[in-house]
């Protein structure tokens, strides 16, 4: 693990965490092949997790049980239990051995109208059941162009800090600029670093970068002092790319 430069106030760089977000991809057959390749691939000593569609958690837990790769889900309910058709509780995810759960992904904020308050409540429920929430924040292109990045990210994170107080220490933040997700447009390392430094000035925790991360751009991004890992969409579906990303992350932590 690299140390902070002498005299710097900056915390030492944390061990990298690389999380694959499979989104709504896969099938029983293709997952089996992907997991077999993942288990056989060298991953370095980064911490690695895959967040998979909930219906596959049983198979994924079965396959990854006892190995180095953690697993998790892509969302959870803010409620404990009850009449919430279609929702999945944090307690249920915990039963399947989940380590992580993504909350507040921009796709859920945009497509399902999830508010900052709801996302914060989901993080609280996840923490209560021993899961590590990966709380996503990030601005749209219009917000960036209007100079609102700091305000938007501050508002999104502020809601979680206000609700969770000290419990926020158990949360991993993922900075995912919406305009960089699935577009092939990556934030420049400098721009990502700037956003990560802003987030850490609000709350000093592990902050992952997400948005078109691939082996070709990973070293520059993950080499930034405040980028502690990656939340990876498309490239996590390709075992060679994901393995390579994990090794790059491990070599830089
Ligand atoms: P891509 O890596 O496909 O851009 O997706 C990023 C993301 O949304 C991860 O949560």
Image (tube, rainbow, N blue to C red):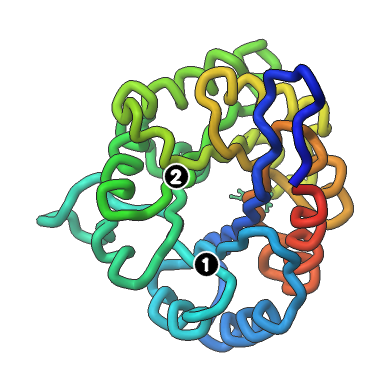
- Crowd class of label 1 (few under 14; some 14 to 19; many from 20; radius 10 Å): many
Other-residue count near label 2 (Cα within 10 Å), few / some / many at <14 / 14–19 / ≥20: some
| Residue at mark 1 | 70
Q: Nearer the viewer, mark 2 or mark 1?
A: 1
Q: Residue extending furthest front? A: 6
Q: Residue at x 65, y 81 (%)?
A: 39
Tell me the SS state at disc 2: helix
Q: Picture coordinates of residue 88 (x, y %)?
A: 28, 60
Q: CA distance from mark 2 to mark 1?
A: 23 Å
Ligand 1 has an atom within 8 Å of the beta carbon of the residue at disc 1: no
Badge 2 vs badge 1, beta-carbon distance below 8 Å:
no
Q: Residue at x 57, y 39 (%)?
A: 206
Lower sequence index among marks 2 and 1: 1
Give the quarter of the image for residue 123. top left
Q: Residue at x 62, y 18 (%)?
A: 149
Give the residue displayed 48% in from the left and 78% down from the top: 60
- As drawn, the label of residue 52 is none
From the Cβ of disc 2, is ligand 1 less than 8 Å away? no
Location of mark 2 (residue): 108
Q: Is 74 in front, or is 6?
A: 6
The image shows residue 228 at horizontal and vertical percentages of 67, 42
Q: Is residue 10 visible?
A: yes
In the picture provided, is 145 more to the left or to the right than 131? right
- Image-based side of 191 in relation to 46, left or right: right
Q: Is residue 158 above or below residue 47?
A: above
């Amino acid at each position: 693990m690299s140390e902070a430069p002498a005299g710097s106030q900056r915390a030492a760089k944390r061990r990298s965490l690389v999380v694959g977000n499979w989104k709504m991809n896969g099938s029983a057959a293709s997952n089996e092949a992907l997991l077999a390749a993942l288990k056989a691939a060298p991953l370095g000593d980064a911490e690695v997790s895959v967040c998979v569609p909930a219906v596959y958690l049983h198979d994924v837990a079965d396959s990854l049980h006892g190995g180095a790769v953690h697993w998790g889900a892509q969302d959870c309910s803010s409620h404990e239990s009850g009449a919430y058709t279609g929702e999945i509780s944090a307690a249920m995810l915990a039963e399947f051995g989940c380590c992580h759960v993504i909350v507040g992904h921009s796709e859920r904020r945009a497509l399902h109208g999830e508010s900052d308050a709801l996302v914060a409540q989901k993080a609280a429920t996840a923490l209560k059941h021993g899961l590590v929430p990966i709380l996503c924040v990030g601005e749209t292109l219009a917000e960036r162009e209007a100079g609102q990045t700091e305000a938007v990210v501050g508002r999104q994170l502020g809601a979680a800090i206000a609700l969770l107080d000290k419990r926020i220490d158990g949360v991993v933040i993922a900075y995912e600029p919406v305009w960089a997700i699935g577009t092939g447009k990556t934030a420049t390392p400098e721009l990502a670093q700037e956003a990560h430094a802003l987030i850490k000035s609000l709350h000093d925790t592990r902050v992952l970068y997400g948005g078109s991360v691939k082996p070709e751009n990973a070293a520059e991004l993950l080499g930034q002092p405040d980028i502690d890992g990656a939340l990876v969409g498309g490239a996590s579906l390709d075992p060679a790319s994901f393995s390579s990303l994990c090794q790059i992350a491990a070599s830089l932590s």
